[in-house]
Image (cartoon, helix red, strand yellow):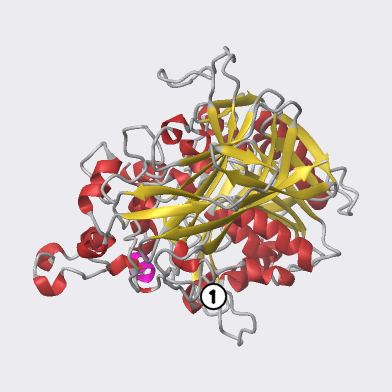
Amino acid sequence: MRRYIILAIFSFFLITNCDKSSQERTLKKDTYVLDNYTKQEVDIAMRDGTKLHTTIYTPKDNSKKYPILMQRTPYSSAPYGAGKMKTKISPNIHLMKEGNIVVYQDVRGRWMSEGVYDNMRAYIPNKTANQSDEVSDTFDTIDWLVKNVEYNNGNVGTWGISYPGHYATISAIDAHPALKAASPQACIGDFFFDDFHHNGAFLLSYFRAISLFGTYKDAPTNSAWYSFPKMNSQDQYQFFLDKGPLKNLNEYFQYDKLDVKTAENKDKIDDFFWKEIVEHPNYDSVWKSKGIIQHMNKVPSSVATMIVGGWFDAEDLYGPLETYKGIEKNGIENYNTLVFGPWDHGKWASSRVRNSVGNYYFGDSISLKFQKEIETKFFNHFLKGKGDKNSGLPEAYVFDSGKKEWKTYDAWPPKNVIKEDWFLSENQELTITKKASKEIKFISDIKRPIPYSEDIKTVFTPRKYMTDDQRFAARRPDVLVFETDVLTENLTLAGDILAKLKVATTGTAADWIVKVIDVHPSDLAEDNEGLQDHLKMSNYHLMVRSEVLRGRFRNSFEFPEPFTPNKKTDVNIKLQDVFHTFKKGHKLQIQVQSTWFPLIDLNPQTYVDNIYKADEKDFKTQTHTVFTDSSIEFSVLK
């Protein structure tokens, strides 16, 4: 029982386990899988001899042959043991009930598989005969499956959400000839930009998840071998503020507690993932080797790909967008499609009719439409159908989160997009006209950092803030606000956003956060079901996109550098793609700030070589300046 409780806790990585989802709950009393499938558990030997635990669900109807749908996961292929069956298998209920051979595999070093786990194990391009990585493990597994599983038709598809989405991406690199379709969903692309870091800033709010990936294990097990830090507080803001510098969190990653308090062991770290983060604060060879985006030229044209993501995914927004763009850039002959909807992490796998993120409602049956009309059609065409490029699906199937409607395009971003610069002017104006450069100053108080949410609670990983009302931040003196007049016609942004800030600081270090916000009309009376009691949709400040850049990385993620005090400096921040129409009667607002706590850790605001080892004395309140010749470059749909 303890293992399944823990599996539920780390839900933020795998929505098909986490939401247990309404889809899972709907099927909880259903015996469809038990009645229609047989289950087999095997240990498949890889080329280096390591055995990976694999669970195979095969339709009982053996009158025809079926494709294989496979998911490789670090989150357990449970339940283990004869007679114990999942209640939901395959990417969605349609593919489950149509009949497919469905395979789950514990990746190397996780749960019942042999070997030692490596977080985002580096891809080895030119392997020797016995070298293994996740690419070869996938290849070897597919090779065994098509040769040994009865009633398979020789075609294999892979899918997964979050970390399993990363392994779906991996499957397409140097792919086995039997792999015909891969759907990486919310796929991790690079741990310096996804999940635990954003542009070099550490996502402090994820610290409880560290032990899930960094607790050592060297033997198969069907029960959890890790535990999560106990915060003993329901106020995460105050908890982390009281803890102080990041080095004070080391105690949560020491598994031998007998000598924790002795001076010589106070900085001891047993968790190999936390140690990796602490010892590698910059984008060095360790992080670069683990990134997968740079290998999209290894995806052959024989593998069709459908990349899926959510516009409001707090964990993995960078990964799916960059994966899609990487395949597009390198694979001119590839069948490669993009699907992005109004979802947070993995909610497209949910069977809920109502689709909302946090307080914001986007419509009904959005996820159900995706599952039936897009995902099922994709896999059936390439695994059971002709498998040619005439799939009947668009190149880009994207949801306009402002108009709340689906659109299709033959390219992403759409071809009729132009770049426009909007300037941060004094008097809180956002204008298309560049004016004389003036200074706007604010104090960044290290004792009163700006919260990322006004909620008082402790979360395992944050999600709802992605659509949170930003009025609470706009009313702080250390948040600069710039907005348009009331729009007289619709304005649609489609593609990435580049904040081109010109700043200065009295210190030598600073973070910079930019938020793009849709300010709703004040006379908007309707309120969403589920809206928090203290909120109204009147004047709702919907956060459409946001991003942080740790200022030391403004010129290079590999070679950080301090600011020169009081010197005007360029800081460019790329915000990930959006597809959002700011409607007539709304306003477009930009917020600029320098803390975002405890979503990200506190910057000392004085330069140190390694923030993870900074001392209390390094943290200083500073005065920051934003110059009004700063601009925001939008991708505007014409």
Is 267 drawn above or below residue 369 in the view shown? Answer: below
Q: Residue at x 63, y 58 (%)?
A: 168
Is 436 drawn above or below residue 472 in the view shown? Answer: below
Q: Which residues are magenta?
A: 272-277
Q: How many dots with numbers?
A: 1
Magenta stretch encompasses residue 601 = no
> Is 425 displayed left or right of 9 in the figure?
right
Q: Residue at x 58, y 61 (%)?
A: 189
> Is 557 displayed left or right of 417 in the figure?
left
307 or 59, nearer to the observer: 307
Is 351 drawn above or below residue 142 in the view shown? Answer: above
619 or 288, nearer to the observer: 619
> Is 231 displayed left or right of 207 in the figure?
left
Rendered location of residue 214, percent (x, y)? 36, 63
**Of helix, strand and loop, which one carries label 1?**
helix
406 or 111, nearer to the observer: 406
Rendered location of residue 497, percent (x, y)? 65, 50
436 or 87, nearer to the observer: 436
Rendered location of residue 265, percent (x, y)? 15, 72
**Amino acid tagged 1:** Ser
Q: Residue at x 85, y 50 (%)?
A: 415
Q: Is residue 216 visible?
A: no
Residue receiving disc 1:
289
- Would you call the spot at circle 1 few (<14 residues within 10 Å), some (14-19), or many (20 or more)? some
Q: Main secondary structure of the magenta part?
A: helix
